[in-house]
Image (spheres, coloured by chain):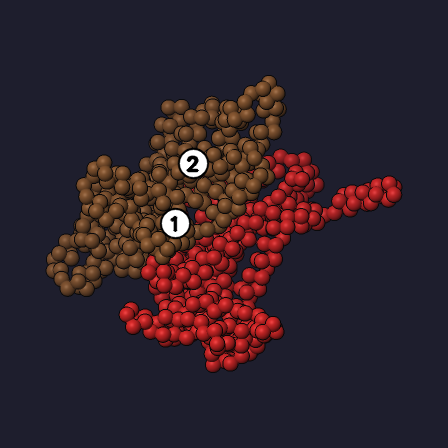
Amino acid sequence: MTRYIFKRLLLLPLLMVVYSFVIFVIIQAPPGDFLTAYVATLASSGSSISAEQIEALRQQYGLDQPMIVQYGLWMKHLLGGDFGLSLEYQRPNADLIGEQLGLTVALALFSFVLTWAIAVPAGIYSATHPRSLGDHVLTVVNYVGVATPNFMLALVLMWVAFAYFDISVTGLYSPEFVDAPWSLARVWDLLGHIWLPALVLGIAGTARLSRIMRANLLDELNKPYVVTARAKGMKEWRLVLRYPVRLAFNPLVSTIGWYLPALFSGSLIVATVMNLPNIGPLLLRALVNQDMYLAGGILLIYSFLTVLGTLLSDIALALIDPRIRVEN
Amino acid sequence: MATTTTTAGAEAEDRIAVASNWRLVWWRFRRHHLAMFSAGLLICLYIVVLLPDFFSTQDPERTDARQAFIPVQMVHFFDDGKLSPWVPAIVGKRNPVTLRMEWAADPQRKVRIRFFAPGYTWRVLGLFETNLHLIAPDDSSVRIFLLGSDRLGRDQWSRIMHGTQTSMTVGLVAVALSVILGVVLGGLSGYVGGKTDTVIQRLIELLQSVPTIPIWLALSAALPRDWTPIQIFFAITVILSLVGWTTLGREVRGRFLALREEDFVLAARLAGCSRMRIILRHMVPTFVSHIIATSSLAIPVMIINETSLSFLGLGIRPPAISWGVLLQEAQNIQTLALAPWLLIPGLVVIVSVLAFNLVGDGLRDAADPYSN
C-alpha cells in the first residue's frame, strides 16, 4: 500500500512538468508578449515606463530569448515561488492566487460533501422503493439536473431570489464580513452562504451519483444473500445498510477520480456567475486581458488540483477495495 | 384458437430469428415511448438547423433601440370562436420616475398573423431565394416578438432559431470528430498493442486528467481575434473534441482487446483476411451500435460545454449566434429582473439536452442484446 502511494507520488512531478510545458505553449500563443501588453496597460492608465525599465523587465523574463529558454526561466521563477507580476492588478501573482485559493478549494470540497450527502440516501431510497412515486420524482429531478448547465441554474436562482424575495445570493459573505479578519462569526457567515453555490455546482454530479448508487444497489438487492438474510428475519433497513449498500459503494468511490477534478474546474463557471472569491473569475479576467503569467499560474494550480484529486481517489479506492491493493 | 396463437407466436419467433441486428435494435428502441418522443423532438430541431430562416419572423440582426426589452407576445389562435391567429399589439409608455420604457399589451389592438406567409427574403441552403416563412404578421411593416426582444431590440424568437443552428451543429460536429479520433486511436491501441498501446494509453490518461474548462478557456482565448465566425466555430469544435474522444477511445480499445481473442477473428485470420478487413468487416460491426449509443450521449455534453464557453465570452463570438451567446444577454441580474424572458434560450438548452439524453439512454438499452 505504502509502495503504491509512493509510486503514484513520484509520478506527480513528472505530470506537472508536462502540464506546465503545455500551459506555457498555450499562454504564449496569442500575438504580442507580456511586455507589449504591460506597456499598453500602463499607457492607457496614463503612466509611462522608461526604456531602461522595459529592457530590465525584458531581460528578467528572458523575452528576447527563444521560447524554450523563456519556459526554463518561468519554471525557475515558479520553483522559487515567484509567479510573476500581474499586469492588471500591479501585484505579485502569488498573492492574488493565494488570497482566493483557500476558498476555491473549500467550495469544491464542500460541494463534494454535499453531493454525497444527498446522492447516497436518494439512491438508496430509489433502489429500495423502485417504481414508487418518490422514485419517479427523483428520476425526473435527476434527468433535469443533468441537463441543466450550472450557470443556468445559478442565473435562475439569483433571478428568483432578487426579483421575488429581494435578496442577493451572490458572494460568500454578508457585506459586514467581506473585509473582516477571520473569526468564528465570519466562518459561520461563510457557512451560511457557501451551501447555495456548492449545491448549484454539485447538482449534475448529485444526479449522476444517485443514478449510479440506485443501479448498483438494485443489482445487489436481487442477490441470494439478501434473500437469505431476509428469510432469517433480519430487520430490513439494517440488512440493506449492512451488506448491499457497502458493496454498492465501490463503483461510487471510483467516480471520485473524475468528479473531484470536475468540481474544481466547474467551480469556475459558478463562481463567475455568482461573483464568488475564486481563482476561476481571476483566470477569466487574466485570459481576456492577456495577463499571461497570472493565467499561466492559475492554470498550473488547476492542473495540480486535478492531478491531486485523481491521486486521492486512487488511494481511497485502494483503501476500501482489497483487490486493487493486491494487484499492486 | 389455441393453434392460431401458437402459429402467431412461432411466426413472431421466426421473424426475430431472421431479423438483422439493426432491426432488433429498432424493435427494442420503439418500445421506449419517451425516447421515441425525444427522437421526434430532435428531428424537429434539426429541421430548424437546416432552415432557421424559414422559422424566423424577422432578420435576427435587425436592431431597433426603440423596441428594446419588449415582453413575450403570446400567440392566440382563436378570435371570437373563429380560427384566426393573432398576437396582442404592444404599446409602450415611458415611466416618468425611472424614465424607462414600460411595455404593455393593448387588448383592443390585435396583430393578425398568418402561417406560411411571405416575409423577408432568405436563401434556402444557399441555393435559391424565397420569402416564405412559417409565421409572419399580416401587415409586414409591424414587427412581432413571439419571445420578446433583447436590449438592442432584436427578436429573440428569430435569434433562438439561428442559435439552434449553431449550437446543435457544434455538438454534432464535435462528437463526429471525437468518434473518428476515438475509433482510430482506440482501435490502433487495442489491435496493435505493444508500444503503440502504451503511448496512446498514456496520452489518454494525460488528456483525461486535464482541468477541462480552464484549459478550454485558455485555448479559445488564444484563438486569433481576426478569425471569421466559421473559423472560430471549427476551432471551438476541435477544442471540445480534444478531450471528448478519450472516453470512446478507451471503450473501443477494451472491445478490441476482448474481441482479438475471439474464435471468429481467428477464423477470419486463418481464412486469409487482411488486417484492415478483419477490423472493419468483422470486429467493428459488433460494437457499432454501442458506439452510436455512447456518442449520442456525448452530444448533449458537448452542447452544454459550448453553451458554457460562449456564455463566459470565450466560445462562439458575436455576431455569430449560439444559445450561449444569447444567454450572455441574461448575465446581468438587474436586466434579468426587468426582462426574465432572456432566460428562454436556457430552457431550449435544457429541453434539447434532455431529449438527447433520453434518446441516448433508449439507444443504449436497445443496443444491449442482454436487456429485456
Image point 37% across, 68% down: which residue? B151
Label 2 crowding class (10 Å Cα cut-off): few <14, some 14-19, many 20+?
some
Residue extending farthest to the top is: A232
Is B188 situated left or right of A253 in this image?
Answer: right
On the image, which quarter does residue B318 sit in?
Answer: bottom left
On the image, which quarter does residue A133 sit in?
Answer: top right
Q: Colour of chain B?
A: red
Residue on which disc 1 sits: B213
Image height check: is B12 above or below A130?
below
Callout 2: residue from which chain?
A: A
Amino acid carrying label 2: it is Trp
Image height check: is A91 above or below B95?
above
Amino acid carrying label 1: it is Ile
Residue on which disc 2 sits: A116
Is B104 situated left or right of A212 in this image?
Answer: left
Question: Same chain for the residues at labels 2 and 1, yes or no?
Answer: no
The percent coordinates of residue A33 (x first, y second) are 25, 57
Label 1 crowding class (10 Å Cα cut-off): few <14, some 14-19, many 20+?
many
